[in-house]
């Protein structure tokens, strides 16, 4: 009974490159949430997705960030043209549905050099 | 706009002490409240989930209470151990389903 899986666990990118972060929800979960934890700050909500739908993207930066959760495969958080300020831990959570408990993955630590 | 505050920001105690961690939120219209533990460089482990209709939840040495009307929750840790050392986060969920986190309490329990 695997939990939420995220890969890679650590990702190093140079400024201007693209970063792709993957999240596989727990078995039976169709709702995925992405959160970001900047150094010395709390976790902030980014986006909430169901299969093939974005439900709430109110926490996503307006530019360079996008997320998807296709019918098949993991959810992807994509950051284009990364900058140093994107360095953070990105956590994914999944749930069975709205209102249900969210279970978190181990996170992807992105470092932009 | 919902804001979540945790006090104290850091706490250092000898093992064996009973502890109280505090969490306050500005909007009482919450769906539930969750307490998490985060170890350095690691993910989040859910400790307790309290629905808005509940007053408290217990798991082993942990007890969490919720007073929705006053916008407060407390996490009580009995007989603390060095293995309890971690950052403790509370998060509230509104009807939009996103979690709003506090900035955490960094706990160190020394032998």
Image (cartoon, coloured by chain):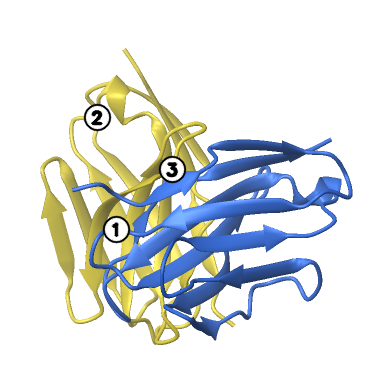
| B71 to B23, vertically: above or below | below
Disc nearest the viewer among 2 and 1: 1
Q: Residue furthest front?
A: A72
Name the quadrant of the C terminus of chain B. Answer: top left
Residue at the disc numbered 1: A26
Task: Kindly identify the residue that appears in the image at 24 percent across and 36 percent down.
Answer: B18
Quarter-of-image position of residue A60: bottom right
In the rendered structure, find residue B80 and report the number of the disc placed on it.
2
Name the quadrant of the N terminus of chain B. Answer: bottom right
Residue at the disc numbered 3: A106
Counting residues from the start of the chain, the first of labels 1 and 3 encountered is: 1
Distance between the Cα atoms at labels 1 and 3? 13 Å
Query: Mark 2 packing: few (<14 Cα in 10 Å), some, or many (20+)?
Result: many
Asked if badge 2 and badge 3 are on a common chain, one would say no
Distance between the Cα atoms at labels 2 and 3? 25 Å
Distance between the Cα atoms at labels 2 and 1? 32 Å
Task: Determine whether the residue tagged by mark 1 lies in a helix, strand or loop.
Answer: loop
Residue A76 pos. (x, y %): 56, 61
Q: Chain of mark 1?
A: A
Query: Mark 1 packing: few (<14 Cα in 10 Å), some, or many (20+)?
Result: many
Q: Which chain is blue?
A: A
Q: Nearer the viewer, residue A82 or A61?
A: A82
Shade of chain B as shown in the rendered figure: yellow
Q: Nearer the viewer, residue A21 or A83?
A: A21
Q: Chain of mark 3?
A: A
Asked if badge 2 and badge 1 are on a common chain, one would say no
Residue A18 pos. (x, y %): 77, 52
Q: Is residue A41 left or right of residue B53?
A: right
Task: Kindly identify the residue that appears in the image at 29 percent across and 68 percent down.
Answer: A29
Q: Residue furthest top?
A: B111
Disc nearest the viewer among 2 and 3: 3
């Amino acid at each position: 009974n695997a939990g939420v899986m995220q890969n890679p666990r650590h990702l190093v990118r140079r400024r201007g490159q693209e970063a792709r972060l993957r999240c596989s929800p727990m078995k039976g979960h169709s709702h995925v949430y992405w959160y970001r934890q900047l150094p010395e700050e709390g976790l902030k909500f980014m986006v909430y997705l169901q299969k093939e739908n974005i439900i709430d993207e109110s926490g996503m930066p307006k530019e360079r960030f996008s997320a998807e959760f296709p019918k098949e495969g993991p959810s992807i958080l994509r950051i284009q043209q990364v900058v140093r300020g994107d360095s953070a831990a990105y956590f994914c959570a999944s749930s069975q549905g709205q209102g249900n408990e969210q279970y978190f993955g181990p996170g992807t630590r992105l470092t932009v050099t | 706009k919902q804001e979540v505050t945790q006090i104290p920001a850091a706490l250092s105690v000898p093992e064996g002490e009973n502890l109280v961690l505090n969490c306050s939120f500005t909007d009482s219209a919450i769906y539930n409240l969750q307490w998490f533990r985060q170890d350095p460089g690691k993910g989040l482990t859910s400790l307790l989930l309290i629905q808005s209709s509940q007053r408290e939840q217990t798991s082993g040495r942990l007890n969490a209470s919720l007073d929705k009307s006053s916008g407060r929750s407390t996490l009580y840790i009995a007989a603390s151990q060095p293995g309890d050392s971690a950052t403790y986060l509370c998060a509230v969920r509104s009807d939009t389903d996103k979690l709003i986190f506090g900035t955490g309490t960094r706990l160190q329990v020394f032998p």
